[in-house]
Each structure stands twice: as C-alpha cells, then as structure tokens.
Amino acid sequence: MVKHNQADLLIANGRIDRQYWHDLWRYRELFYFLSWRDILVRYKQTLIGIAWALVRPFITMLIFTFVFRHLAKLPSEDAPYPILVFAGILPWQLFADALSRCSNSLVSNANLISKVYFPRLIIPVSAVIGSFVDFLFSGMILLALMAWYDFVPNWRILTLPLIVLIALITAMGVGLWLAVLNVKYRDFKYIVPVMTQLGWYLSPVGFSSSLVPQRWRLLYSLNPMVGVIDIFRWATLGGEANISWPGFALSMGMVVLLFAGGIWYFRKMERSLADVI
C-alpha cells in the first residue's frame, strides 16, 4: 500500500509539472489581481503618491550631474550630461525596484502560499509590474529633458520596449534566486538593499562605461546591468553612443544564464516553500 501511494504521488507530481506552464495562463486573473494590488499599496497613504516616481530619479539626476559633470568633469559623449545620467538612472532604477520587490514577494505573500495551490511563479512575476509602472512615469522626465535641451533621438528609440524587457528579465533572473533564499534565510532582507546600493557605483549609472579602460571592459561587463544601461543609452542618445559590443554580448549572456538558472532554482525549491515559509 505504501508503494502504491508513493507511485500515485509521483504520477500526481508529474502531472503538475506537465501542466505547470499551462496553469500560469489559467491563473492569469490572480496575476492581474496581485499586480494591481501591489501598484495600489505602493503609494497608499503617501502625501504625493505616484509623484515619488518622478521626485526620486530627478533628485538623483541632479546630484549625479553635479558630482560627475561639474566636479569630476567627465565627458558627456554626444548628449547633454543630464540626459546621459538619466538614461542610466532609468534602467537601473527599473532593475533595482523590480529586484527588491521580487526578492521580498514570497515572504510578503506567505499566507497565500500556505493556503491554496497555484503556480508560485506568479507571485515574483506580478511583483515586478509595479516597477514597470514607475518606470513609465519616470520616463516622462527623460522626455522633458529632451524637450528642454532640444534633443531629438533617432530611430533607435523604437527598440526601447525590447530593452526594457531585457532589464525586467535581468531583475527576474536575480530576483528569483533571492526570493527563495529570502524564504530560507531572512538575512537576505538586509543583504538586498546593500547589493542595490553597491550597484549604483559598480554600474555606469552616472557616467559612460566608455571611461572604463579597454583592458577591463570584458571583466566589467560581467555585471549584466552594464550591457543593459549601455544599450539603453545607445537607443535613447542616438549618435555614436559608445558601446562595446563584445562586452554587451557578454552581459546578455549573463542575463540569459541568471534568468534560466533563476527559473530552474525556483522550480526546484517551489514545492518546499509552503513548509519553510
């Protein structure tokens, strides 16, 4: 009888695995609900609400422009320095916010996970949608800066949707690892903010990555956000924005590796989440 029950369990688990990706579509209404809930809760009981999506990157842009342009006297390539900086802040802020939400998503929804079956992958994926909404609002500042400086981008701007998707996939790849680790070891709640803070300085947010010596460019590009920021600037600044294509290819390889590994690790640990959380 015991062997029969174990066999039934294996068959049931196999059926769940086969239907898992189909279940993601079946539970799309849950995905919509969680996404919309996170958007509403983010700025609930704040004085200026969604305007924080504009204030934070704008202040950061002013500080970075003052430090890197006026104090350090760094070059701005073919664009005004505030536009160069903001074209680095936008993808980095999208990545950092999505990473933070994704890494905390499972712990924040512990009650839901322990009560009912659904593909748990819905939770971290829905968590990054709010970051995309913030990105759309912050993008208005970039448009305003371009209008202020009479800066007109070229056809490359049409590639932005794909580049934004790459940034979200990068955040998801890292975030899926951290989401599971955060369930097992709550210390990661404190580690993630430190990681994103360090990322500000390890990524070319306030300066062009072309300033990195050529012999270090490939090593520097192991940071996947280097390629994301470089290609974002390539699309928004137009002209001859400096980009190392071998370095970009390496960064994209890291993105694919992190995303595939994140999906694999999440699926491997998914069945034990309800017991641990």
Image (tube, helix red, strand yellow):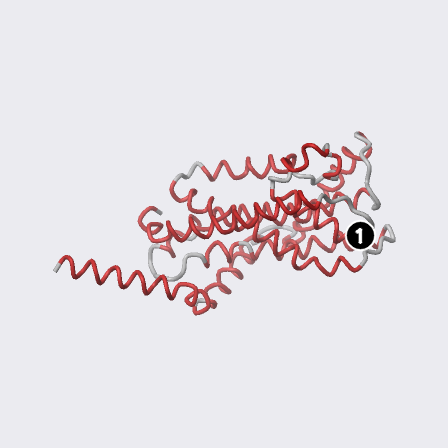
At x 36% / y 50%, what residue is drawn?
273
Which image quarter holds the N terminus?
bottom left
Q: Which residue is mark 1?
A: 238
The quadrant where residue 158 appears: bottom right
At x 74% / y 42%, what residue is drawn?
61
Horizontal and vertical percent for residue 44? 56, 54
Horizontal and vertical percent for residue 73? 82, 32
In this picture, residue 32 sits left or right of residue 63: left
In this picture, residue 3 sits left or right of residue 70: left
Horizontal and vertical percent for residue 266? 42, 51
**How packed is label 1: few (under 14 Cα within 10 Å), some, or many (20 or more)?**
some
Count of number-bearing discs? 1
Q: Residue furthest left?
A: 1
Residue in front for this viewpoint, 54 or 180: 180
Judge whether 262 appears above or below 162 on screen.
above
Horizontal and vertical percent for residue 221? 64, 40
Judge whether 138 appears above or below 213 on screen.
below
In this picture, residue 32 sits left or right of residue 120: right
SS label for mark 1 = loop
At x 47% / y 40%, what residue is drawn?
189
Residue in front for this viewpoint, 258 or 195: 258
Q: Residue furthest top?
A: 71
Question: Could you tell me the amino acid type at mark 1?
Answer: Gly
